[in-house]
Amino acid sequence: MVTLPDYAGLVTSTETRHLLEGFEQALASMFRADGNALPIIEGALGRNPKFTLGHCLLAGALILRGADTASGALAASVAAIEADTDASERERRHGHAARRWLDGDVVGASQAYGELLRDHPRDRLALLVAHALDFRLGRRDMLRDRVASVLTHWDASDREYGFVLGMHAFGLEETGNYRDALTVARKSLEFIPDNSAAIHVIAHVLEMTGTPDRGIAWLRATQPIWAGNAGFRVHIAWHLALFQFDAGAANEALSTYDDLIAPQLGAGNNSLVDASALLWRLQLLGAGSQWRWRDVTARWIQQRTFGSRAFDLVHAVMAMAASRQHGRARQLAARLKADTMLRSRSGKDELSLAEALVAAIIAFCRGRYDAAVESICTVRAMADRCGGSVAQCDLIHLTLIEAALRGHQSRLARTLAAERAARKPASGLNRWLSARAWTRGTAKLATARA
């Protein structure tokens, strides 16, 4: 049997060129995050259900979808890989890694994909999945180092080189190497000018360095690119609203939500996470919106959340508590302990944080601010391991400072506000929080003296 290599020169078990072309098209779609990968590879498998490399890609694509995964389809692809006696060693290892994830062992799946990438550093599918699992497990050093370790096997002649640079840039940003992240992200855009992932990295750097005006300008200038990208359009719109929120323009942030995020809420858990995270921040700012919350809550109720990550569940609880459906919020929060698949697909720190955070959110929405402060303070030191990016995890710090302000814990509020202002002195939001903390503290002292 004479088999064909893939574009990266790796051995495959297929002899059929048009099937391999389908694999390449679907893999290119995954790098672009344009939402077309599944239809392309499902079409190839429809023509030949024994296309093992296609099943490897379908399994990887379904894992990347996370909680939205069709477990039956994933199980069928894993079984097809395992049943193929002619599968290459690398394809069998893809099947083994996907099996680990299917069985609920996200750590084992991450390890298996990582080892596969170590032995085959030009395996593009393994790189995509391992990178995504590193992110979900909060392994920020691995976000940077895993991609860095394979970059020496890539060069400018490879068509995905710009995308790999973008992945490395994200790891650099998440580990605080902002200058290097900007350099690498810009280099990525030189190779692939419409790489929404690299645009996203630069947005993160501008967010973490507290320059909201520059962030708004950057995302407005690149909006024609990212607004048409299925994988990034909601999340980058969330970043745009975050910059507006940081600049004190709550009405503009709400307009961004209405125009760019709300119309996409049917896109799955990720869009609902972004919606909940933005509306919660605006509510902390005093710009709450019950009708928007009710819409998001209704979407969460319709959405599949069994077996999802704890990170997703926290945002579902947030929507239900904010829309005053406290019974539903408590029932959903109980799943953090009862849903075995959710627990196995979530990182250990992510779970610990989630349990404390949902208790704080429910308490906050019932006006029990001291209880919210107490709950968050137990996990504050590990807040950056929430299961999302550093920017996403900041919601925990914002909730804590607002609970301290509303609970009249002035000394704590001033300390937290000072910490934020030191990290991002250009942030209008941080200046506002500092002013509130000192004003409330001064008023409380004056009352006590009187």
Image (cartoon, helix red, strand yellow):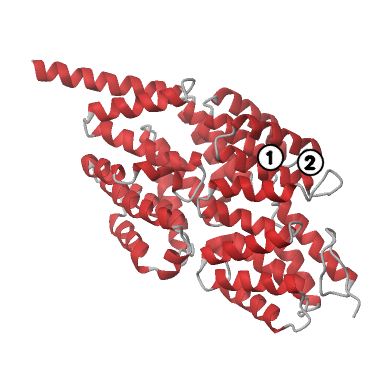
Figure check: 419 above or below 299: above
Helix, strand or loop at label 1? It is helix
Residue at the image position 62 percent from the left and 47 percent from the top: 145
Residue 56 % position (x, y): 70, 70
Circle nearer the N terminus (2, 1):
2
The residue lying toward the viewer, choosing from 54 and 419, is 419
Could you tell me residue 131's position as x and y percent? 62, 53
130 versus 419 height, above or below: below
> Does 129 sit left or right of 306 as displayed?
right
Q: Is residue 298 visible?
A: no
Q: Quadrant of the N terminus?
A: bottom right
What's under tag 2, amino acid-wise?
Ile
Q: How many C-alpha atoms fall within 10 Å of the one at disc 2: few (<14), some, or many (≥20)? A: some
Q: Residue at x 48, y 30 (%)?
A: 245
The answer, for residue 404, to whether it is visible in the render is yes
Q: Which mark identifies residue 198?
A: 1
Q: Which residue is mark 2?
A: 192
Type of residue at label 1?
Answer: Ala
Tell me if mark 1 has few (under 14), some (14-19) or many (20+) residues whose alpha carbon lies within 10 angstroms of its own: many
Q: Are marks 2 and 1 in contact (CB under 8 Å)?
A: yes
Secondary structure under the numbered disc 2 in the rendered image: loop
Q: Quadrant of residue 238?
A: top right
Observer-nearest residue: 242 or 139? Answer: 139
Residue displayed at 80% across by 78% down = 48
Number of disc labels: 2
